[in-house]
């Protein structure tokens, strides 16, 4: 299945939660979800009862859309999380947070993970001084992530820095916003990752 390229705010309205799919509009409090907090379409405001399977599927869809991961990638990540020691759901979130595109987003170099993925794809991002253009690249603690020299004056990157200065940076990255580089200091604990996803339901879905 191809990556979804339609109107992302429609996805947020359908799932009923902000997934940080929009940048400036979300940070300015102007997202479509805030203005119309009900599903899109003719029957969007009707109340419908969701089955147990529907709830589990919705949580998986939230995580997939939020991190920009396709079904095959997501399933493989789940299998890896299941093989690891500890809680499978927590392991899954930690693996998603280690994706390079997500780390670029967490460092404030992009207002959305979609834009962060674009930066990585187009070769604007260096890892320990080497260009890496694979968004799913797994960042390890201690690695340095930076915007390459030729891209530092990119107006979209500069705008992202300006906007994310107002929202703060997560505690598991150390960022120098003037020089546009950061260190991924550690893998975050699950309770530190504020995402509207109940990974327990994802585990139940894949465990059937």
Image (spheres, rainbow, N blue to C red):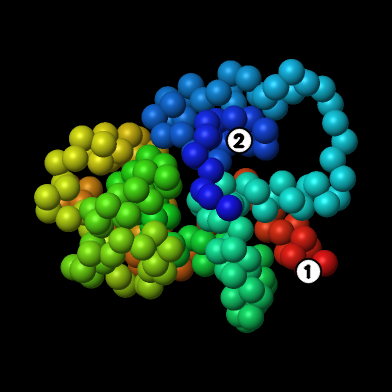
Residue 204: x and y, percent?
Answer: 78, 63
Could you give the CA–CA distance between mark 1 and mark 2, rounded to whole angstroms? 26 Å
- Can residue 95 be seen here? The reply is yes
Horizontal side, residue 194 vs residue 82: left or right:
left
Q: Residue at x 43, y 63 (%)?
A: 136
Q: Residue furthest left?
A: 150
Residue 25: x and y, percent?
Answer: 44, 26
The residue closer to the viewer here, 178 or 133, is: 133
Residue 31's disc number: none
Q: Residue furthest front?
A: 1
Q: Residue at x 83, y 52 (%)?
A: 53
User: Residue 38's quadrant in the figure?
Assistant: top right
Residue 207's disc number: 1
Residue 11's disc number: 2
The residue closer to the viewer here, 138 or 122, is: 122
Secondary-structure class at tag 1: loop
Residue 26: x and y, percent?
Answer: 47, 30
């Amino acid at each position: 299945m191809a990556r979804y390229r339609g109107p992302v705010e429609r996805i947020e309205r359908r799932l009923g939660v902000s997934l940080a799919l929009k940048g400036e509009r979300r940070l300015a409090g102007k997202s479509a979800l805030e203005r119309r907090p009900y599903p899109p379409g003719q029957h969007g405001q009707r109340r419908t009862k969701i089955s147990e399977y529907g709830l589990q599927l919705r949580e998986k869809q939230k995580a997939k859309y939020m991190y920009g991961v396709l079904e095959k990638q997501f399933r493989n990540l789940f299998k890896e999380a299941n093989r690891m020691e500890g809680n499978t759901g927590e392991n899954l979130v930690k693996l998603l947070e280690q994706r390079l595109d997500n780390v670029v987003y967490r460092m404030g170099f992009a207002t959305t993970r979609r834009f962060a993925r674009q930066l990585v794809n187009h070769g604007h991002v260096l890892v320990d001084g080497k260009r890496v253009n694979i968004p799913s690249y797994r960042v390890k603690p201690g690695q340095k992530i930076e915007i390459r020299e030729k891209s530092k004056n990119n107006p979209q990157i500069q705008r992202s820095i300006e906007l994310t200065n107002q929202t703060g940076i997560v505690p598991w990255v150390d960022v120098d916003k003037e020089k546009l580089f950061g260190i991924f200091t550690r893998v975050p604990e699950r309770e530190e990752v504020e995402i509207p996803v109940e990974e327990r339901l994802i585990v139940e879905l894949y465990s059937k």
